[in-house]
Image (tube, coloured by chain):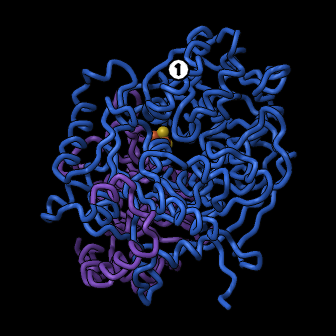
Amino acid sequence: MTAPSTLLDQLWSAHEIVRRDDGSSLLWVDRHLVHEGSHHAFAKIEARGLAVAEPDRTFAVVDHYAPTRNRARISDPKIKYMVDTLRKNARKHGLRLFDLDDPGQGIVHVVGPEQGLTLPGLLINCGDSHTSTHGAFGALAFGIGATEVAHVLATQTIWQKKPAAMRLHIDGTLGPGVGAKDIALNWIAKLSADGAQGHAIEYSGSAVRALSMEGRMTLCNLSIEGGARFGLIAPDETTFSYLGGRSYAPRGAAWNAALEDWSKLRTDDAAHFDREIRLNARDIAPTVTWGTSPEQAIPVTSTIPDPTVLTNGKAEAVRDALDYMSLDAGRPIEGTPVDQVFVGSCTNGRIEDLRTAAAVLSGRKAKVPGLVSPGSALVKAQAEQEGLDRIFVEAGLEWAGAGCSMCVGMNGDLVAPGKRCASSTNRNFRGRQGPGARTHLMSPAMVAAAAVTGTITDVRPLLKGRVG
Amino acid sequence: MPGWNRHSGHAVALPIHNIDTDQLIPSRFMSTRRKEGYGGFLLHDLRKDESGDDHPHFPLNRHRHASLLVAGRNFGSGSSREAAVYALVDAGIRAVFAPSFGDIFAGNAVNNGLLPARVSEDDYTLLVRILGESTEPADVALESGKLSVGEIEVSFSLDPSWRTKLINGWDDIDQTLQHVADIERHKTSWNQNAPWARPAAEAQRS
Ligand code: SF4
């Protein structure tokens, strides 16, 4: 009998080619996703005269710099340069490119799953920290830097040390208006932004099983904000029915073989975890950030921390964050006026996210301006078919094209200096949405609520009598 | 990338926690080609005011010759942008000493010859106290894992594989190319055992 193993163990050993004495493993990479930011890596392999080892396993996506309006003509020369460089590299190396006019274009972490490129049992790399998203399918997925991207391009392998295993077990039922984003902000606030460093998190428990694939992706996506590079959820019926029939997913006999193999991908009951954390979904309220790190998050019903009463060595950081965010300590976070809202990103730009935001906004007007950027062109088409775009537009929000957009502002969708934005994104870092921008992270439902009242607002009363 | 074992320079403290890679280099500078140099982007929005002038009090503006940085926990968290490391390296920084690092950042650092050295919370506090707002001559020894600043000496921890890589200036692609036969063997058996692992469109073509 083999020793009880975790899902992480199983995925790791399936991909391990060799292990060095120093503990580093050379791993086989099944999917390599690249985007405009991969230009340094392409330049590196070019400088060494190397080709892409496995072009059929490498996929290129325009997302970070994708204009969300008038995309046929890019006027900003920097943006044009970045998109053209990716086009040139994709052509040169024979890569499938999801270009701006492709019906499958979108944010890399939305596109991968949607196209069936992301599958259980695979190892997936991308030069982007939110690659942890793909772990929602039971894949070993992690973000890498440019030197490593060049390495994967050249060899289709990656050197990596096996992380420690951590289990985050969440039982219970989420209340109405509470979702995967709230679970994530909640545990990150508890454990801090480096709380899971060096660990791969496996999410388990009835609350996780009850999540849709969209919700699971949100949860795994945010693993990195708590310091973990990997998030994992064992695949199940929800996973399989999401993947069936997707463009690059296996078909026919291969599909049946896949289902048989994938069903075995689960942590053995007696397997050992280096750390175990338990939460109850019932205790989780809609959560918002008040500061400049995702760990600075509180229930919307709570008050802004007061540095003068803090004794845990965080007082200085709290003071700095409050200063940057221009907030008063000790005041309720609810009722804080916002200047604008944003719905989108690889965290919360999927169809379910747009549906929950639309459920709040339907028949209501936004008091502040805002932008809705779907996570992909397919999400956009689906939302338009369901009439969600009309709900947003009638509420007074702008409905734009797919891309990273205001999550990082590289395409020019920026929050102006000093402005406060309620945002469904993943990073409230200083200047993340633009120099001097003030970001409050929250779920898409909460962003919609902020739009309706023009302030940070508990979404729950706004959902009474509606399906949210 | 040349390897290194000892470095003597000047240390400066930046006692802030969670200095994320968006701080280390704001995203708007990331379309720059590497050969144009990234040093001027380092911590851009913390160092400069709206009109682009340096804040006179910011530690790195007062001590431009510093090559060793002491910083708060979770240094380099956030985005995987290797440009954050380019900004540090191009500004002449050789090592960062902090209680913890973002994992991807630390790996990127080692790939560019920059040392991400973990120090205990107590030693971090001690270093910040010694350095204050000034700068002190300091020595780093990779092999023994020691940093000395004036009279005091602190130990730092570093993954042994990273230590070897920094000292030898190893390049991963060169290392990997020694395993080409192993890679081929793995690929063949994986293709057989997990036929579903190849993208379907590719399977149809071949
Ligand atoms: S949406 Fe934001 S976090 Fe996600 S890949 Fe794009 S820039 Fe990164």
**Label 1 beta carbon within 8 A of ligand 1:** no
On the picture, is B163 further left or further right than B205? right
Q: Residue at x 71, y 46 (%)?
A: A211
The location of residue A123, given as percent across then percent down, is 46, 64
Chain identifier, purple in the render: B
The location of residue A295, given as percent across then percent down, is 67, 48
Quickly name the residue at label 1. A384
Quarter in which the C terminus of chain B is drawn: bottom left
Rendered shade, chain A: blue
Q: Residue at x 30, y 36 (%)?
A: A99
On the picture, is A177 further left or further right than B203? right
Q: Nearer the viewer, residue A280 or A117?
A: A117
As drawn, B139 above or below A295: below
Q: Which chain is disc 1 placed on?
A: A
Q: Nearer the viewer, residue B147 or B162?
A: B162
**Which corner quadrant of the image does residue A387 belong to?**
top right
Q: Does residue A222 appear anywhere in the picture?
A: yes
